[in-house]
Image (tube, helix red, strand yellow):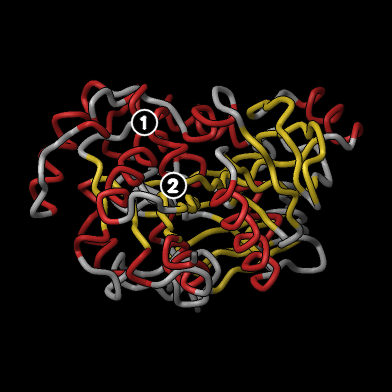
Amino acid sequence: MENNNYCVILAGGVGKRLWPVSRQDHPKQFIDFFGVGKSLLQLTVERVQAIVPTDHIFISTCEEYAPIAMRQIPQLTPEQFLLEPVRLSTGPAAVRATWHIAQGCPDANILAIPSDQFITNEEEFCKSVRKAFEYVASHNTFLALGVKTNRPNTAYGYIQRGRKLGEGLYSVKSFTEKPEQQYAETFVKSKEFLWNTGIFLWNTTTMRPVGESIMPGFFHSDIIISSIEEENDIVRSCYPATERISIDMLLLENQQMDVLECRFGWSDVGSWPVMQDVLPKTADGNATVITPATEHSYSGAGGKVVFKNCSRTIVSVPEGVATVVQGLEGYLVALQGNVLIVTPNDNAKRLKSLVTELQVMYGEEYL
């Protein structure tokens, strides 16, 4: 059974909500935010290696990120990097990964996991994923991993539990992606909802009709593929006609879906407000990120930041930059390359809109 278990790590995003540290040419998944000498992608690979054999792990990323991804994860072969010719979100990436894996294992069970997860209980995570693999191997349904809500958070998706199917297992009654504050408060208060972790599992037979719906003919091809180059040519011919949709929206809004309630301590570190929550903090709630001096260095250690009369403020600066901030409450101060930003750190959507505004005014140079 375990020989049929595979994993695809979704690592093709640009990470606008962690701008300006996350940039188009070096996005968040390749950055060491925690000063541990490993990027978010490297930590994710280590996490899934405890569950899935290394040769059953695939990384989905866009073609332009292939060199840095391969450099950071040398234990994987070039054939284990599934390259997207264009960014069409995670839905098409998941379909392509399923198609690729099915060529070698027609009855594979697949775990899809983002590369920007923060998980505190690795043992419990492994236990949950193993249970999830067993479930999708014997049920013709998609399975989401959800965690209990503990506060309203408009940056997360909310899964409403339906009928109980087993220990910790429920049908999905409804799904709401990034709700407004008032709805998030209602969802948490009701205790009927789980946060969507963005981690999903399925069997190839379950994904096949979904894949055919957004990539017609993809799974019907009789072509014998002899190399990854030939496969990439087929993918390039299919991708321009595919639909731009996230895996969350593709599965949770359109397919039969169940959810496993998990307790492994989870956060999606895709935005500065969440990063503020998970980073080590001073007594006043201040946090520091020291980014590498060069893009080829993964260590985030070192750096000098002084807080004066500040609270709940996060400062991110490169190694070797001394920084003093005074009188700030609940702010983000981030310097990276040719961009410095100082803004309240209470709304990830606001930062994303600022990035778009900057792009309109000054072009791509600062992205």
SS for dot 2: loop
Q: Which residue is mark 2?
A: 20
| Residue 153 circle label | none
Residue beneath disc 1 = 211
Counting residues from the start of the chain, the first of labels 2 and 1 encountered is 2
Residue 49 vs 244, above or below: the answer is below
| Residue 29 at x, y percent in the picture | 42, 56
Identify whether 162 is placed above or below 120: above
Residue 64: where, in percent of width, then height? 21, 48
Q: Name the residue: 49% across, 53% down.
A: 111
Q: Nearer the viewer, residue 136 or 332?
A: 136
Query: Helix or strand or loop: what does disc 1 sit on?
Result: helix
Q: Is residue 137 left or right of residue 164?
A: left
**Would residue 96 be seen by someone viewing this image from the given angle?**
yes
Foreground mark, 2 or 1, reads 1
Q: Residue at x 73, y 47 (%)?
A: 330
Give the class, few, some or many, for how many residues have Cα within 10 Å of label 1's Cα (few <14, many ≥20). many
Q: Position of residue 135 (x, y in %)?
A: 62, 51
Q: Which of 245/320 is in front?
A: 245
Residues 109 and 33: in front is 109
